[in-house]
Amino acid sequence: MIVMKFGGSSLADAPRLLQVADLVLAAERTPCVVLSAPGDSTDRLLAVARAAAAGRADEARDGLAELFTRWTAEAEQLGVDPERVPARLRRLRDDVELLLLAAGRDPAATARVTDAIVAHGERISTSLLCDVLQRRGARVVEVDARDVVRTDRRFGRARPDRAAIRATARQSILPHLATGTVVVTQGFVGSAPDGATTTLGRGGSDWSASLLGAALGVEEVQIWTDVEGVLTADPRVVPEARPLVALRPEEAAELAAFGARVLHPATIQPAVDAGIPVTVRHTGRARGSFTRIAADVPRAGSGIAAIASRGPVSVLTMTSRRMLEASGYLAKLFDVFGQLGVAVDLISTAEVSVACTVEADAPIDALREALAELAHVEVTTDQSIVALVGEGLRGTEQVLERACRSLGALLPRMVCFGGNSRNLSFVVARGEEVEVVRRLHDEFLGGDRRWDAELVGTAASLHQEVSR
Ligand code: ADP
Ligand code: ASP
Ligand code: MG
């Protein structure tokens, strides 16, 4: 058994959905197929929900009509009875009307109904693919992810209950796979203890795939997307970025946490805990290269694996003379962040000041107010984090010197050697992020450190080449 997860980019239109069907039918092991919403549907559904919640009825209904038109046309192209699309989506229309009624009055209902609306993107994908597979003679069953992926009630960013998922997946998915029946289910979607629809946060389908893979004990979790695996940088930023053959789980998790959007940051853990390799593959180039992420990949002694970046973030610089003599001062300071539910990312300290990064949407005014008694606070917005990642980072000669030299006049606001020694991060102005990534890539992964295909074969040789 395997899990095959296809992202929105692989499901954006009818020809691509047919390509997905081909891959599913060609799979050598029985797949549990996990699907995202088609293309940018999630963005559009969120826009519809936001308009409805704000009482902008025309905008919400127009947005919905546009989606219906698009999905109906796609069904027609696929040879699926187009009448079935509106029938399937009646509930979506009802939810949008419900949100219009609750507009501005009930924030709890807004969060709950928004998740119910957004989940329809994944649901249209699974119903279209199931129809196509059935008509091509496959034995296939559609499983509603809400019956399997149990979560808490944090709408929009629900946390999964791994023990419950293990039990439900074994009950409602495993028996089908065991008899060779393909299972198709939604990524990103789950349900709260009272049955309300929840979602796992943007990009969360990867996480669903890994959770289900771990619950089912599959041989491999395959993440099918629009790139040939994890590359040395985001190809949209560095066009010459090249695919990595193998990565250690810690490296992949670190890259995801620092912005490599190809994997949701929570994806790696469930699979690795269960000893299952994760592969990242290109839907349009199934025979091309791909990345294997597994615990048996050797640790590189030196070399950077890849560069990731993430923004916008804000830097908070907190200054107080009390820092000089007081032990326990930092604990008090960061307790304020904890109480306000603000996650702190990078930290660096000086004699009487400490700087840290927080997400751009953190409640800065509330933080400033709550910290007023403890420190003077300065906030710098519109910053980005750029991270060099690799097990071999520490062993890379003059890594810091080379990084700083390549940045030249692009002076970083903060520099952090990650506590785990596989991460060297720079906080730079948002406008300089792209240039910083390109220069670092050039220095550590590009130019004459060109890919030599013959050397590739094992992860060890890969890392050797990268570090040369
Ligand atoms: P999907 O719709 O399949 O979930 P995503 O858009 O979420 O796809 O993720 C794939 C994208 O991630 C790529 O198109 C690429 O632009 C981006 N990306 C960022 N960093 C990397 C990286 N290091 N390697 C590969 N892709 C990356
Ligand atoms: N469709 C969801 C999103 O766009 C989940 C995913 O694609 O992973 O965020
Ligand atoms: Mg994604």
Image (cartoon, rainbow, N blue to C red):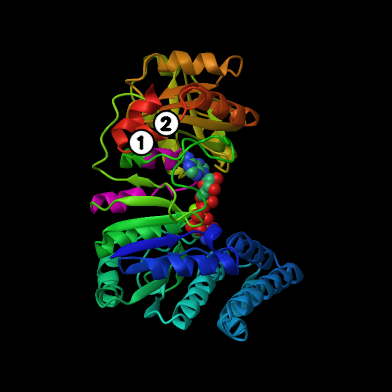
Q: Residue at x 45, y 45 (%)?
A: 341
Q: Quadrant of the N terminus?
A: bottom left
Q: Residue at x 65, y 30 (%)?
A: 431
- Find numbered disc 1 in the image and state the secondary structure of the residue it sits on: loop
From the viewer's perspective, tell me whether residue 283 is left or right of residue 117: left
- Which residue lies under the disc numbered 2? 452
Q: Over which residues does the magenta segment extend?
A: 252-274
Q: Is residue 113 magenta?
A: no
Quarter of the image for residue 58 reads bottom right
Residue 456 badge: 1
Q: Is residue 261 magenta?
A: yes
- How far is disc 2 from disc 1 in space, using C-alphas? 7 Å
- Residue furthest to the front in view is 454
Say few, some or many: other residues with alpha carbon within 10 Å of mark 1 (under 14 / 14 to 19 / 20 or more): some
**CB atoms at circles 2 and 1 under 8 Å apart?**
yes
Residue type indicated by callout 1: Val
